[in-house]
Amino acid sequence: MRLVFLFISLLVFPLVNIAQETVSGQVFDFERKTVALEGVVVRNLNSGKALQTAVNGHFTIAAKKGDLLAFSKSGYHIDTLFLANLSPKRIFLPVSANELNEVNILGARINSGVFFKDPEAKKMTLFETDDLRGKKNNDRAGGLKFNLGYGKYRKAEIKKKQLEERDGFDEEINSNFNDRIIFNLIKLQGEDLRVFKYLYKPSVLLVSADRPFDYNGYIVKAYNTWLKLPPEQRKMPTMPKM
């Protein structure tokens, strides 16, 4: 009897393990959350196995904890997912910027209460009239006068806009590249987490060049690079002596 039980165990337990070593999920359009995407290529970058999502966006692929999955479809940004567990996943792919359809505006309604005109505001232009209409003949001729402060004003406005945009990107980066999010994705903590943030914090130029920026995918790719670093490079650089 014991031999029969052992034989059955040897047959059943491997099948249970195999059945558990998969991950399932659905892929949707990032903007239209309820639109499932068919034909998305789901690839396990660790094992090399790949498949395509079904009509309802569903997929089931062989994988284990710690594997890295990549999702790709023509017209969409490539997304990656680090498997911290094998629970069902919901993936949202953003449309690639160069695939956005042109929007034709046929009409618009403006709420007059949205824009309030400051009665004391004065519009600054490159040139304006010199208000000499009606002067006597011996006065200088009326016409246009150049506002020499216009160029300085425009530069100040552009600089202000650039600073506001940079502040917005800095806030976005800090909200999506912080201790909590990094730990949830790749489980780094302590000194390793501090060094990882120093080495791989995305720049404003990088984030602004690829909208919407895939922070999770970037963190996972940076972590793969981190794992390849020798131990002596996984530390903060030495500060020069004054």
Image: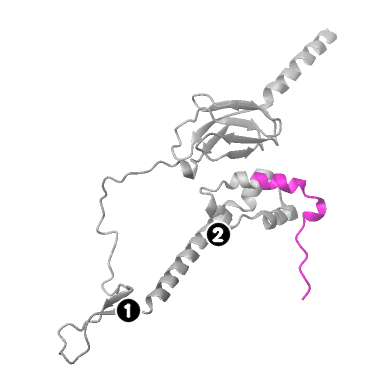
Residue 146, which numbered label? Answer: 1
| Separation (CA) of disc 2 from disc 1 | 39 Å
As shown in the figure, which amino acid type bears the numbered disc 1?
Answer: Phe
Which residue is denoted by mark 2 in the rendering? Answer: 170
Q: Position of residue 197 (x, y in %)?
A: 67, 55
Which residues fall within the magenta stretch? 220-242
On the image, which quarter does residue 111 sit in?
bottom left
Indicate whether 49 appears above or below 169. Answer: above
**Residue 49: x, y in percent?**
67, 27
**Residue 85 shown left or right of residue 211 in the figure:** right
x, y percentage for residue 82?
Answer: 65, 39
Q: Secondary structure at mark 2?
A: helix
Name the residue located 74 percent from the left edge and 55 percent from the top edge. 191
Q: Which residue: 27% across, 45% down? A: 106
Split into 4 quadrants, where in the image is the C terminus? Answer: bottom right
Q: Which of label 2 and label 1 is nearer to you? A: 1
Give how far across and how far down residue 145 sits, in percent.
Answer: 29, 80
Crowd class of label 1 (few under 14; some 14 to 19; many from 20; radius 10 Å): few
